[in-house]
Image (cartoon, rainbow, N blue to C red):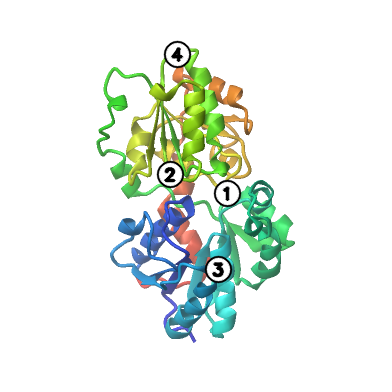
Amino acid sequence: MPKTPSHIAIFLRSLAGGGAEKVMVNLSRGFVERGLKVDLVLGNIKGAYNSQVHPHVRVVDLQAPKLLTTIPKLTAYLKQEQPFTLLSALHYPCEISLWAKRLAGVSTRVIVSEHNTLSVEAKRLPQLTARLTPLAARLFYPWADRIIAVSQGVANDLANVTKIPKEQIKVIYNPVVTAELLEKAKEPVEHPWFMSGEPPVILGVGRLIEQKDYPTLIRAFAKVLTEQEAKLIILGRGPQRERLNNLICELGIENHVAMLGFVPNPSAYMARATVVALSSAWEGFGNVLVEAMAVGTPVVSTDCPSGPAEILDNGKYGELVPVGDSEAMAEAILRVLAGNNKSVDAAWLQQFTLENATQKYLDVLGVSQTD
C-alpha cells in the first residue's frame, strides 16, 4: 500500500520552458501549500523552471534523459516510494507513468493530464512519434485511474481519439493566475522600447516552433506598420529562430522587431505591452492569454483548437481571428491599438487561479490534505 494518502508525485521528462511544465510547477506549489508531501520526479533535471520550484517540493532526478531509460527508473522510484498518486503531464510522460505502474506492481493511482489537441498535432507535425500519439493514447490512456484535460476542446478531441466516454474526462483549466505572477508583473523591464514616448509594443510569447505559427504574427505586424508606428517583441527560443529572422529581413522590418529568447519573467513584459498576440495554429489551452488578461493587457488570438475561445469567452474578453490569417490579425491588432479594448471581468479570471485549480486537482487525485 502507498505509504501516505497525502503523498503526491508529479512526473515530467524535464522542466524545459513550456506551458505544461510551468503549470506543474505551479500545481506542486499549490499542493505543498495545502500541507501535502510532493515529489517532482524528472527524467532530466535540466530546464528553465528549476529555479521556480517551491523549496518544500522534493525534486527527484532520475538521470534518464532518454525515453527507454526513463521507464525502468520511474518503475524503481514507484516501488521504493509508493506515492498515493502519480500525476503526469504531456503525452509521453503520461504513457511512461502508466507503464511504470504496471511494471512496478504498486497500487499508486496514476492520473494523466493531456495538454494538447492530439489529432491536430498528429496531422501538423512531421515526426513519426507525433503521428502515432492518437493511437498510443487510444491504447494506453484507458489504463489511467483518472484523465484530466486542460480545456473542453482537448477533452472533446481526446474522447474522439481514444473512444473514452467524454464524461470520464475531467476538464480543469490551468492554474495560471498566481500571487507570484501578479507580483512579478510589477518588476521593471530595461528594454528601451518600453520607455515613455516610444511606439506601442506588440508582444508574442512562446517557443519558436511550428505550433505557435509566428510567421502569421510577423506578417500581421508588417501590415500594422503600413498603418502606424509600432514595435514587435517575441519572447521564446526554439528551432525556427533562423527561419523567422529570415522572414523579418525579407519583409524589411528588422529595425522594428526584437527576438529576445527565453526570459524568466515574461509577465513583466506583458504588463508593459500594448497588446499580447497569440498566433498559434493549435493549442491545448493558451496560458499566455490568461497571463496577459491577469495583468490587464488586451489580447488578440487565433481561434485555434483548443482553448483560446474558451479563455476569451468566444471573443467577449479579447479578439479572435482565423488561424493563419495575417490580414485579420493585423486588423484586430489595429483595433486594439486604436483603443477598442475589451475589459475582463475579475470574476471570470477566478477559474484560472492556482487556488481553484489546486482544489479541483486534489478532488480528482483523491488526496487527503493535512491542514
Asked whether 369 or 125 is in front, the reply is: 125
| Element type where label 2 sits in the image | loop
- Earlier in the chain: of badge 2 and badge 1, it is 2
Measured along the vertical axis of the image, is residue 309 above or below residue 177? above
Residue 237: mark: 2
Asked whether 350 or 201 is in front, the reply is: 201
Residue at mark 2 to residue at mark 3: CA–CA distance = 30 Å
Read off the residue under disc 4: 228
The residue at 67%/65% (across/down) is 136
Q: Report x, y in % for residue 26.
A: 40, 56
Read off the residue under disc 1: 284
Residue at mark 3 to residue at mark 4: CA–CA distance = 50 Å
Q: Report x, y in % for residue 176.
A: 43, 48
Q: Report x, y in % for residue 354.
A: 41, 53
- Earlier in the chain: of badge 3 and badge 1, it is 3
User: Amino acid under label 2?
Assistant: Arg
- Earlier in the chain: of badge 2 and badge 3, it is 3
User: Amino acid under label 3?
Assistant: Ile
Camera-nearest label, 2 or 4: 2
Measured along the vertical axis of the image, is residue 273 above or below residue 25? above
Camera-nearest label, 3 or 4: 4
Looking at the rendering, in which quadrant would you find the C terminus?
bottom left
Residue at mark 2 to residue at mark 4: CA–CA distance = 28 Å
Crowding near pointer 4: few (<14 within 10 Å), some, many (20+)?
few
